Image (cartoon, grey):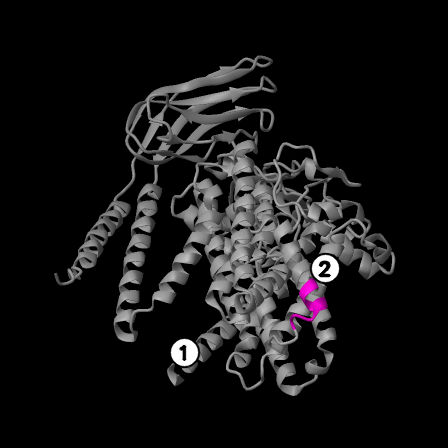
Amino acid sequence: MGKVKKKPYIRYVILGILATLMVGCIIRIAMPNREWNYTGSYTFAEGESYTEEPVFEHISLGTGVYRVELSYECTGDAIAVCTVKDGTVYQGGLLCNGEHLYSALGHTSYDFWLYEPTEELTVTIDYSGREKLTTGNLRIVETNLLWTRYLVILAAAALLVLATMWLERREAVKGRNEQRRQILFGIGVIAFFASIPYFYDGMVSGADLTYHLHRIEGVKDGLLTGQFPVRLEPRWVFDHGYANGIFYCNLLLYFPALLRMAGFTMTESYAFYCIGLNIATAAIAWYCFNGIFGDRIIGLVCSALYTLSIFRFFKLVMVGAVGEGSAYTFLPLVVYGIYLVFEKDVEDREFHKSWIILGLGYAGLIQTHVLTCEITALFTVLFCLIYIRRVFAWQRFRQLACGAFFALGLSLWYLVPFVDYYLTQDVRIRHASARTIQDRGTIFAQILHQFWFSRIPESMEGKAGDLLNPIGVGLFLVIGMMIFWLLLFLGDLQKQKEAEKSFAIKAAGFGCLALWMSTNSFPWDNIQKISGIAATLVSSLQFPNRFLGWGTVLLVTVTGYVIRYFQNNRKIFYQMSLITAVVSLSASYLFMMDSGVQERDVTLYNQESMGFGYISGEEYLIYGTDSTKLTFARPEANENIQIADYEKSGLNISFFCRNDSAREEIVTLPVLMYKGYAARDDKGEVLEITDDGGHILQVCIPGGYAGTVRVRFVEPWYWRTAELVTLITVAGIVFFGIRKRRQR
């Protein structure tokens, strides 16, 4: 019997259906939305608490995403929570966390997702009994978020179909490549296992999770209010605006922020981001380790060891350290770039692209986690010292310099505002040099832990009361390193390729150093006493276990070299090492499953349910700001100032103001006093801005003035210039890549 030919038109039919549905979504988005208004009033008895007290009942709504606006008057902040309930819909048919009530706001404004028509929707209040509370009228507004969400899903499905068609056409031209398919399948399997924690409706409540969710919401809020790139998150710190985006680059967080804008819940957006991060990590790790060892299978094994490593899982899932976890995506690029610069022959084609790989790796680190970049810079310097003679070989030095300038060009849009604020704004992070970190280090036994049960009390307490988790790089990687040193000592590696062996020796040495630097036996406290700069740098690290990221990537490199040696020389050991790797990863997987069951998880749908005040260590507040006094507020002025028509949209404020006195008066606005704000009157004349002493912005109103005052955040010209340089760099590298591809 002959082969049954594939029907080539099935994909076109699928694309047609998807396109039709997308057009339907667009038409629905263009249609006007409805709203429902309900009148009523409910006064809560002060001193008596209420749980799920209904204020409006029996509301009929169809499927959709809606915004709840309940007016209220209260005399305190966060004394109650307004939410939406419905016991008649199926589980998961109504998604809502609600919103806390604040005296300065006067009404709620939060979204809920309804996936089943209902006639029994109820708006409820959980009231603490503190202060006074009276609720008023209710307004429910239909939004387009359900349809924009469907539109994104359909577009993603269409892109997936187009990608399969493109791959099929490419194979028709270049021939079927089974190895490529196997590699893609392997990367997919690795990413799938790494992403299992994100396949359920919830998130592990890690120590850093809420902070990074606020970062995502901050990008979303900034974009929605017309700010690009987002420098100050406008709603953070109770609508005062927080300079987190200037100090902590949020480039990768634009993806989940755009998903939030498209109608996905906070949990869904975060999960999609982490899944994408796992796919990118698995693919990049395979590319780099395949390049180092010249073997696709070894590349896959190393990708699995790195992507599924116990330390990466701990940071990304258990702690919720999204910045640090994102940075680990780019560490293999730096390692591969260093290998190409110093070990590849200068005539090799791979050598000539080393500056691109190194530059991309460093740019990724700079724009995800500055502390990991700081550690990476240290190890890069150490590699350069070991390779000092090659550093001064012109062709290799040129690759290093080009990589550095490339990374700088890609990152200048972020670095210029960062340096500007760090030098001109007296933020708290500049006063952290007194914090010691040595007692927060791990012990050597912890480095060998392959997995542990999350409720076993194996943690230690550091000086600052920080719990240190018994997590290291894992027993398998340590054994791989020990086998390497044994083979080297016995002379079994004498006939191996010099480039790979030389780099593996250095990776093993620096890997041991990274493990030592992560422990409490490394003399961090003594180093901190050397100088003020040393104290600042060491203190900024916070936790010595950050060095385990570099320890992991270097030990994966060494273990990959050992497996490669067994593959070429001792087949039985090669097979045993692969089996052991699978067992090791299975142990990590068991840890993941156990932790997922035992750890406390949270499910968040909207930003309002988190509140707006959590800013972790408050590193980017102006030094001296009392965060306990910050809450939602209205403009404040004395009796000589009359204020009306106050509006605040992101970082832009406008209000009508009349100064009844002949002298200059002050209006205090609920805005943190960062550099960049400017105030103007009706005629465009600049009004003076001052600090109230607590680092809250004040506008000076001239005597007798009556008119509109506008306050907005304005980026300095040199910030915009830096953004232009980055844009030119990106365009240049794209042009360079297209040109090289055509030449081949």
Q: Secondary structure at mark 1?
A: helix
User: Is residue 637 a member of the stretch shown in magenta?
Assistant: no
**Quarter of the view holding residue 164:** bottom left
Along the line of sight, which residue is nearer the eye, 580 or 340?
580
Q: Secondary structure at mark 2?
A: helix
What amino acid type is highlighted by mark number 1? Ile
Q: How many marks?
A: 2
Spatial separation of the CA atoms under disc 1 and disc 2: 41 Å
Find residue 666 and report its horizontal and vertical position in percent: 67, 45
**Quarter of the view holding residue 38:** top left
What amino acid type is highlighted by mark number 2? Cys
Query: What is the residue that sits farthest to the left in this orientation?
Result: 1
User: On the rendered image, what quadrant is the N terminus found in?
Assistant: bottom left
The relative height of residue 591 versus residue 179 in the rendered view (above or below) is above
Say if residue 652 shows up in the picture: no
Which region of the structure is painted magenta? 486-493
Q: Earlier in the sequence, mark 1 or mark 2?
A: 2
Q: Is the Cβ of the residue at disc 1 closer than 8 Å to that at disc 2?
A: no
| Residue drawn at point x = 32 percent, y = 30 percent | 36
Which residue is disc 2 drawn over? Answer: 512
Find residue 576 and report its horizontal and vertical position in percent: 54, 56
Disc 2 crowd rating (10 Å Cα; few below 14, some 14-19, many 20+) is some
Q: Is residue 561 left or right of residue 431?
A: left
